[in-house]
Amino acid sequence: MNMTLEVVPVPVTDLDRAKEFYGEKCGFRIDLDSEVAPGIRVIQATPPGSRCSIALLSGMPQMPGTRKSEPGSLHGLQLCVTDIEAARAGLVERGVRVSPVMRLGATGWEEGKGDTWNSFMSFEDPDGNGWLVQEAPAELSER
C-alpha cells in the first residue's frame, strides 16, 4: 500500500494574511478557500510543481488523540528548487524576507552557494513558521 504525503497543516493566526503570504508572496497555488462546516474554514495551497499541499485552518477541532500546534511552531519544512538564486530573487522581489544562500562547510554554515545538494536558504511566514529551501540538481521527475 502506498502512503503519500499530500497535505501538511500549517498553524497560523490570520487566514487572510497567511493566504496572501503563501499565495501572492510565495507563489503557491490556492486550491481551496472554503468554509467546510459551520465556523470551520480551510485554505489549501500548493507550492509550484509540488504534489504536497499545505492546509491553513481556522476553527478546526482537534481530532481525538492529537495535539494542537501553535502558530509559529512549525519549523524545518523543506522545499526544493533547481535554481536557488533565481528562487531567492523571486521571493525577495515579491516581498519575502529570505536569508542569504548558505552552504554547509568545514566550519559550519557559510554564506554562498555550495556543491550539489548543499545550497540552502530560509524564510518565515508572518507567524514565524520556518521554511528551508534547498537546491536540487534536477526536477523531482528526473531524479
Image (tube, grey):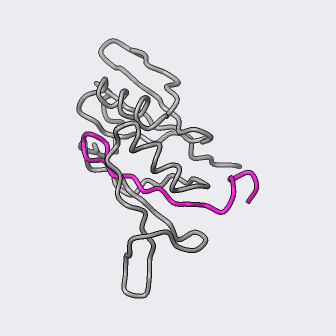
Determine if the magenta segment contains residue 142. Answer: yes
- Image quadrant containing the C terminus: bottom right
Residue at horizontal 37%, vertical 32%? 56
Q: Position of residue 34 (x, y in %)?
A: 43, 16
Residue lying at the far top of the rendered structure? 38
Q: Is 83 displayed left or right of 108 in the figure?
A: right
| In the depicted structure, whether residue 55 falls above or below residue 36 | below
Q: Is 49 displayed left or right of 45 in the figure?
A: right
Q: Nearer the viewer, residue 54 or 16?
A: 16
| In the depicted structure, whether residue 17 falls above or below residue 79 | above
Residue lying at the far bottom of the rendered structure? 106
Residue at horizontal 42%, vertical 25%? 43
Q: Nearer the viewer, residue 109 or 38?
A: 109
- Give the magenta part as a residue range: 123-143
Q: Nearer the viewer, residue 98 or 130?
A: 98
Snapshot quadrant of residue 71: top left
Q: Position of residue 17 (x, y in %)?
A: 29, 28
| In the depicted structure, whether residue 110 falls above or below residue 3 | below
Q: Position of residue 88 (x, y in %)?
A: 45, 51
- Tally of marks: 0
Determine if the magenta segment contains residue 135. Answer: yes
| In the depicted structure, whether residue 117 falls above or below residue 62 | below
Residue at horizontal 33%, vertical 52%? 130
Q: Position of residue 120 (x, y in %)?
A: 46, 63
Snapshot quadrant of residue 92: top left
